[in-house]
Image (cartoon, rainbow, N blue to C red):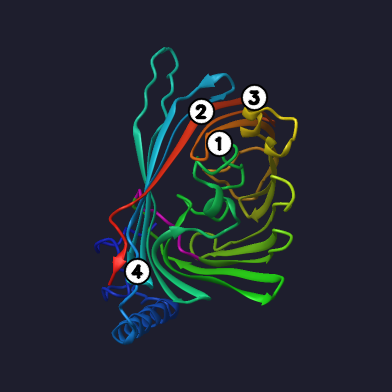
Amino acid sequence: MAAPHDCSFGCTRYWCGKPAFPDGRRALPLQRTIVALIFLLTLASSLRAQSEDTDVQRPVPIFSAGMGFITPFQGGQPNLDPLISPIFLIPIGDRWLIESRDTFESDFATPPGSDTFHGVIQKEVDYLQVDYIANPYVTVTVGRYLTPFGIFNERLYPIWIRDLQSDPLILPIATGPSNASTGAMFRGGFAISPKVNLNYAAYYSTLIAVSPVDSDRSAGGRVGIFLPDQRLEVGGSFQHLLQDERSNSFGFHFAWQPPPIPLDIRAEYARSSRGSGYWIESAYRLSQIATAQDYLRNVQLVARMQQFFVGALPSEVLPTANTQEFEFGLNYYFRDNLRAVSSYGRQFSSLGNVNVWTVGITYRIVTPIGHAGAD
């Protein structure tokens, strides 16, 4: 693996003028195109700002944080997993936005022969990106961003959003060593017809071998078709790895919220040279049951079934044997941002069958920094 680039974080190998790779090759034409496009978008934004009416409400920064204390029991072995994840949204004008999310967590466990929990704090830069809203259909992103492969990584990963606290077995497929990419991304959506919307994302990521901002060199994209009346989305993802074995990965996703029912149904399938599999999950709130007592209206029932199949190439982050797992969960919402979570599951594989229990609590706060005012 090539040594990490020695420039400060945020530059690219093309911008600093150094060779992109150890053998002296220059940056790819795609990188030069991205740099030129970002320059033109910046210039256009500056010219537009000079001519726009400034008597508008100025957006303010937002601070948010998700916190949780999760206790999983894998095969009877308890772990203590406290976590805090601060998020910052900093608007610049009405077209630029800086976003960041970091995660600080620890996995406390009892080593063999000890009855005391030990662990270290793990730090991860989930994303740190600059967004430019070019128009209602295109947003340009540069920096470190969540890899847009499937739906779980971008939409469901935070502990205060997910219905079950364990990760799907196929999550590491195509999302890189830390579920994030570093480079440039174009994304957006538009209406194909009054009843059909299309959303898309296309990205290029460069290689960074330094934790906690590591990423693979890859290119890919995702496209989805959304039916607003039915609240139904189907779509697919593709990624080509531009390093190591230069393999391809692809996936499909499905999400449905039936309009008259407080029910979520989601599913994903992913396949790569390192493994393949699927998960399907449903979550139902008891709020619609007329005979339910007040406390039952805050209860959510969850179920998930998943399978993983080992691929031709080894992987350090995927299961090493064919695995099946089912889980049932029960969550209780004290408020929209505070809930108790619990689940039971059983995992089956040739390495042994184990029970998986999880209990915990999650909480999220959101607050503006400052007050909106006229520019």
Residue 39 vs 339, above or below: the answer is: below
Q: In which quarter of the image is the C terminus?
A: bottom left
Q: Residue at x 52, y 46 (%)?
A: 157
The residue segment tinted magenta is: 211-218
Q: Residue at x 55, y 46 (%)?
A: 315
The reply to whether residue 299 is visible in this rendering is: no
The reply to whether residue 132 is visible in this rendering is: yes
Which numbered disc covers residue 165?
1
Name the image quarter holding residue 23. Answer: bottom left
Q: Looking at this view, is 239 or 196 the one in front?
A: 196
**Disc 2 or 4, which lies upstream in sequence?**
4
Nearest to viewer (mark 4 / mark 1) = 4
Local crowd size for mark 1, using a 10 Å CA cut-off: few (<14), some (14–19), many (≥20): many
Residue 160 vs 135, above or below: the answer is: above
Nearest to viewer (mark 2 / mark 4) = 4
Q: Which residue is drawn at 58% across and 50% down?
A: 152
Measured in 3D between alpha carbons, the distance from the residue under mark 3 to the one under mark 4, in whole angstroms, is: 56 Å
Nearest to viewer (mark 2 / mark 1) = 2
CB contact under 8 Å: marks 2 and 4:
no
Q: In the rendered image, which residue does mark 3 sit on?
A: 354
Q: In the rendered image, which residue does mark 2 sit on?
A: 360
**In the image, residue 239 lies at what x, y percent?**
57, 64
Give yes or no for residue 215 being in the magenta stretch: yes
**Disc 3 or 2, which lies upstream in sequence?**
3
Q: In the rendered image, which residue does mark 4 sit on?
A: 57
Local crowd size for mark 4, using a 10 Å CA cut-off: few (<14), some (14–19), many (≥20): few
Helix, strand, or loop for circle 3? strand
**Disc 3 or 4, which lies upstream in sequence?**
4
